[in-house]
Amino acid sequence: MEGSLRGRDMITTQEWSGEEIQAILDTARDLKRKREVGEPHAYLRDKVISLLFFFTSTRTRNSFEAGMAQLGGHAQFIDSTTTQISHGDTAKEIGEILGRYNDAIGIRRCDWGLGNRYIRDVAAASRVPVFNMQCDMYHPFQILADLLTIIERKGDPRGLTINVSYAYATSYQKPLSVPQSLILLMTRFGMNVRLTHPPEFRLIPEIVEQARENARQHDGSFEILDDFDAGFENADIVYPKSWGCMLRTTDHGESAKISQRYSDWIADDHRMTLAKKDAIYMHCLPADRNIEVTDSVIDGPNSVVYQQAENRLHVQKAVMVLTM
Ligand code: CP
């Protein structure tokens, strides 16, 4: 690989080359092994990362904090509501100032039409790497963990069929960041990517076009289906999860009404029989249990959700080690 990754932002995997993503996966595997055998790996002693959250989190916060401690550094959790951001601190000021105190800045901001722009504005003003801990468009660390999980479970991902599907949920309008990031990354690894959703739940057209182009360049395929059952058929990997219909409406009441038309889009035992016998069921969590997916599927033998959650720790440590 040409050059060092020191100082690089991670906002979307689309801005990292295939070779660089491979370096993340290799480093993550090495760090995972070191943790398993109890080998110290304090590569970031005296380094500090600031984790700025505008939205709730279980996995992202815990895995970044634990990962940084295991690397010998410190992570400071910042709930945006405890800051002066609502009283005027701008994105530029956050980048300039937090960048002078810390060695990296992680940000989660999922507000539709705002999150990605905010993270990029902070990054433009920051002298240290900025990590996207989920925005309205991308969730890069989730899908890096997902790719590592697929490789651990299935080996070489080339030629595997993955069904990235909408599923019904009632909890809230979930961001488009996971399905968009999945179709962008998996098409770069020679996979046959199916995107399955009702017509109202389209993804951002420019991102869909990028995924199509990725598939063309990397000997994969990309298709869009609107039939929940057809998406499962003969798939090696099924990833049915809810997202919002933001491109249609940002009104919560109207979006809830639209979603109700698809209340039968639930990953259940019957749907799993349509996929390959050894297909894996994936979900980034949290899931709406028995609405989005039945207990029998998410807790069943094909589910790899806890391995996915664990791998968040290892890929995030890898990116921190390579960039900070
Ligand atoms: N998957 C994921 O990002 O989980 P959290 O929202 O709990 O961080």
Image (spheres, helix red, strand yellow):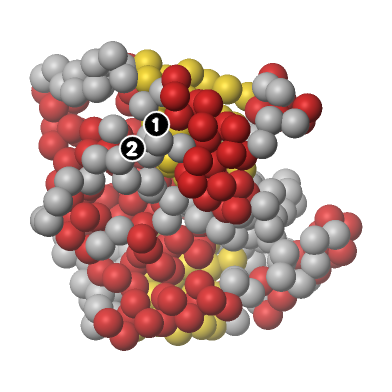
236 sits left or right of 249 in the view: left
- Which quadrant holds the N terminus? bottom left
Residue 104 versus residue 71 in the image, above or below: below
For image coordinates 32% across by 45% down, the residue present is 8
Question: Mark 2 = which residue?
Answer: 316
User: Which residue in the structure is indicated by mark 1?
Assistant: 104
Tell whether 184 sits left or right of 81: left
| Residue found 17% across the figure and 41% down from its top | 27
Residue at 84% in and 55% down: 252
Q: Is there any visible trace of residue 55 in the rendered image?
A: no
User: From the viewer's perspective, is residue 217 above or below residue 154?
Assistant: below
Q: Nearer the viewer, residue 310 or 274?
A: 310
Under 8 Å from ligand 1: the CB of mark 1?
Answer: no
Question: What x and y, as percent, mark residue 187?
Answer: 34, 73
Whole-Å distance between the Cαs marked 1 and 2? 12 Å
Q: Quadrant of residue 219?
A: bottom left
The residue at the far right in this view is 253
Count of numbered circles on the image: 2
Say if residue 14 shows up in the picture.
yes
Q: Position of residue 234 (x, y in %)?
A: 36, 77
Q: Please identify the quadrant where the C terminus is shown.
A: top left
Q: Nearer the viewer, residue 94 or 69?
A: 94
Coordinates of residue 244 in the picture (x, y in percent) = 69, 61
| Kind of residue sitting beneath label 2 | Gln
Pair 1/2: label in front: 1
CB at mark 2 closer than 8 A to ligand 1? Answer: no
**Left or right position of 253 against 121:** right
Which residue sits at x=43%, y=76%? 210
Q: Secondary structure at mark 2?
A: helix
What amino acid type is highlighted by mark number 1? Ala
Question: What x and y, as percent, mark residue 281?
Answer: 41, 56
Q: Which circle's residue, 1 or 2, is located before the other in the chain? A: 1
